[in-house]
Amino acid sequence: MRVTLPLKMTTRTYRDAINSLNSLQSNYANIMAIRESGDRRNQMNIWEMQEWSKRIGYNVSDFNKLNVIHITGTKGKGSTAAFTSSILRQYNDKLPKIGLYTSPHLKTVRERIRINGEPISEDKFTKYFFEVWNKLGNTKSNLEKFPHMVDGSKPGYFKYLTLLSFHAFMQEGCDACVYEVGVGGEFDSTNIIEKPLVCGVTLLGIDHTFMLGETIAEIAWNKGGIFKEGSPAYTVMGQPEAGLRVLEERATERSTKLTQVPTFKALKNVKLGIAGEFQRGNASLAVVLAAKALEKLNVIDKTIAVEEDAHIPSEALKGLELTRWEGRCQTIERNGSNWYIDGAHTKDSIIAASGWFKNIVKSSFNKKILLFNQQSRDANALINYLHNVVSPEVKFDHVIFTTNVTWKSGTYSPDLVSMNTSKDDVEKLKIQEALRKEWNRIDKHRPEVHVTPTIEEAVSLIESLRQDSLDIFVTGSLHLVGGLLVVFDK
């Protein structure tokens, strides 16, 4: 007699989770339509995040248990978040689990949600991903209040990951969590946190102007939106005057105080885990943010004095030294050549990264190669900033402009699929050809300028140029950097 066994339910995999997540990306046409409409983010963004949270089983006040350190800014907020997390991890006897939420990711989306410095596992990501997915699918919202939340709809890509991070950190029982704002602050999906322990603002600059405004003052207003009553706020020294003034006004509005953090003298000779002299300001801010959080959690008796000569505890110094943050002023030795990698993509960050590269290689006799892409911002302006910094001390022998497509088959690594850029522009190499033309205009030394359709082909080209050691500067986009690291790992 034949016995028919019941079919097993198909187990959903990490790849299934990534495919589902990628379906939440806004495509290029939708993004352009929103831009043309003049619609910017508004308070509905926060109300919707609060509603999504309720639908997966949380009141927003529940997230206060995560003891959040909230960080915004234009340049260096990811590095500051990484420094802060690393310092907190030095107190693991009192705080066994430290969460870290950042964006974007480099190689795998799991990098955005870390516990004790490590991306959550594929199994946990998949488990928590589909718990959120299913709860959203099985609940409904009042369409009069939330007309966009029709049955079966999900939050967009970044909102979903933010929601997922809250769920994962709550389920894992994190003792404290460092949250890097995605864009801006006032209407950012991370800003549903009601009572952060402390807030930080890194250096302000012009970026994401469609959503944040055209001026430093407008951008500062958005960034200062994370300030909360009862949560002390800190920022780095050297902010643009107009931006600092608005940040101070925003702090007053929110019944808190904004304090400027100097670069501590005690960090002068510390070998930071993230290279670059400009990182000392970010590291100083991280020290104060971590110390204030630790004080409020009764882990230390008193916070650090906010003055240049302040004594910095050994735990904080160790945390700064042990910080690891790929793609930011990172050096990789590979096949006898030196790869200098930084995902800088704004004016200020390109200038800082280019200065870092120049200072390292200006005395080197190796051939110099630039590998660059920026698909959505003003790429021509960025390469002009870069050239102005490195020239005349550093002369490139070869300049390569590529897309962010990972493989020469024309495909992306699954975690790096991007639908928010023009497919036509990418396939026709429009931006890359424009960059080639611009570089030929600005560089009188006439290096060989190449265009490649994929990152894998750019790496193959560089390998074919190698006779002796090379110094390769990779910059312009974190998506480029992430794809490069994936190609290295293949």
Image: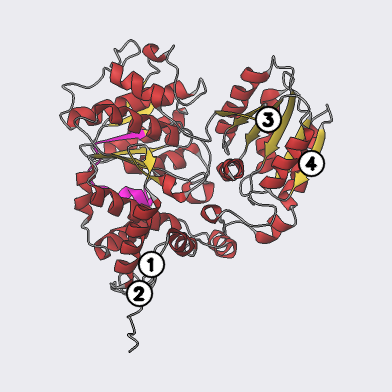
Residue picked out by circle 3 = 472
Q: Earlier in the sequence, mark 4 or mark 1?
A: 1
Residue picked out by circle 1 = 11
Using the image, tell me which numbered label, if any, was put on residue 450.
4
- Residue 258 at least partly seen: no
Region rendered in magenta? 186-200
| Callouts 2 and 1 close, C-beta under 8 Å | yes
Q: Residue furthest front?
A: 1
Q: Is residue 171 left or right of residue 280?
A: left
Task: Measure how far apart labels 2 and 3 are at the Cα level.
Answer: 51 Å
Q: Earlier in the sequence, mark 4 or mark 2?
A: 2
In front: mark 2 or mark 3?
A: 2
User: Up-down: is 477 above or below 30?
Assistant: above
Query: Magenta stretch: residue 194 in it?
Result: yes
Q: Earlier in the sequence, mark 3 or mark 1?
A: 1
Q: How many marks?
A: 4
Examine the image and state in which quarter residue 412 appears: bottom right
Q: Amino acid at mark 1?
A: Thr
